[in-house]
Image: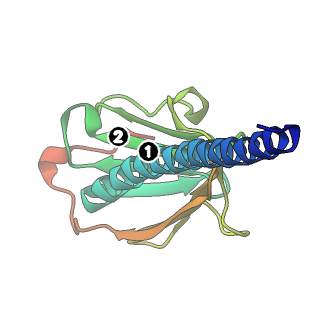
């Protein structure tokens, strides 16, 4: 084998190994991005499903904090009578639930469910009408942002006497 052949084979080997390394790095990066998008999708979905269930069973609700906090008095009973959902100033999705005899604590004390939330344009996180609430936010990830929007309507037209009075707020 001549010196020219050795140099040529070495260069070809470096090209093949470099190409394989590039494919490996791209695959690794794509997998990490897909994982963060999947996790954000799952956690955001749990957050919005909680809102949907609370609103379907709501006796009363209110949006406060310039549209960043939703409080709901529900007919779910037990530790889920009073429910709260908020997006705080740092972009953390927070949610909590209490029994009917307990007022919802300050939103800043609720457990963080997901970080990286942001508004979609200038739309408030929560907007309300007399019978419905709309939510709109996105969660940023290492991959693409994941958007969540929806409107939920109260299905309960009257508060049963057995529900007592609203002690959630």
- Separation (CA) of disc 2 from disc 1: 21 Å
Left or right of residue 83, residue 40 in this image:
right
Image quadrant of residue 86?
Answer: top right
- Residue 66 horizontal/vertical position (percent): 67, 56
Front residue of this view, candidates 14 and 166: 14
Q: Is residue 169 above or below residue 54?
A: above
Left or right of residue 27, residue 74 in this image:
left
Identity of the residue drawn at 41% across and 56% down: 61
- Residue 141 horizontal/vertical position (percent): 62, 48
Q: Point out which mark residue 43 bears.
A: 1
Q: Quadrant of the C terminus?
A: top left
The colour scheme applied to this rendered structure is rainbow
Residue at label 2? Answer: 82
Identity of the residue drawn at 56% across and 31% down: 106
Front residue of this view, candidates 24 and 29: 24
- Determine whether the residue tagged by mark 1 lies in a helix, strand or loop: helix
- Determine whether the residue tagged by mark 2 lies in a helix, strand or loop: strand
Front residue of this view, candidates 58 and 113: 113
């Amino acid at each position: 084998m001549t010196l020219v052949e050795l140099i040529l084979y070495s260069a070809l080997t470096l090209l093949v190994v470099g190409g394989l390394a590039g494919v490996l790095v791209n695959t690794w990066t794509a997998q990490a991005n897909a994982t963060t998008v999947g996790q954000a999708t799952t956690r955001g979905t749990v957050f919005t499903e909680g809102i949907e269930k609370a609103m379907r069973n709501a006796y009363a609700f209110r949006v406060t904090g310039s549209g960043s906090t939703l409080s709901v008095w529900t007919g779910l009973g037990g530790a889920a009578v009073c429910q709260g959902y908020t997006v705080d100033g740092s972009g953390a999705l927070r949610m909590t639930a209490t029994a009917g005899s307990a007022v919802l604590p300050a939103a800043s004390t609720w457990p963080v469910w997901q970080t990286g939330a942001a508004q979609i344009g200038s739309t408030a996180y929560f907007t309300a009408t007399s019978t419905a609430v709309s939510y709109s936010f996105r969660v940023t990830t290492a991959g693409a942002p994941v958007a969540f929007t929806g409107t939920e309507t109260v299905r309960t037209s009257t508060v049963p006497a057995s529900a007592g009075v609203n002690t959630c707020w």
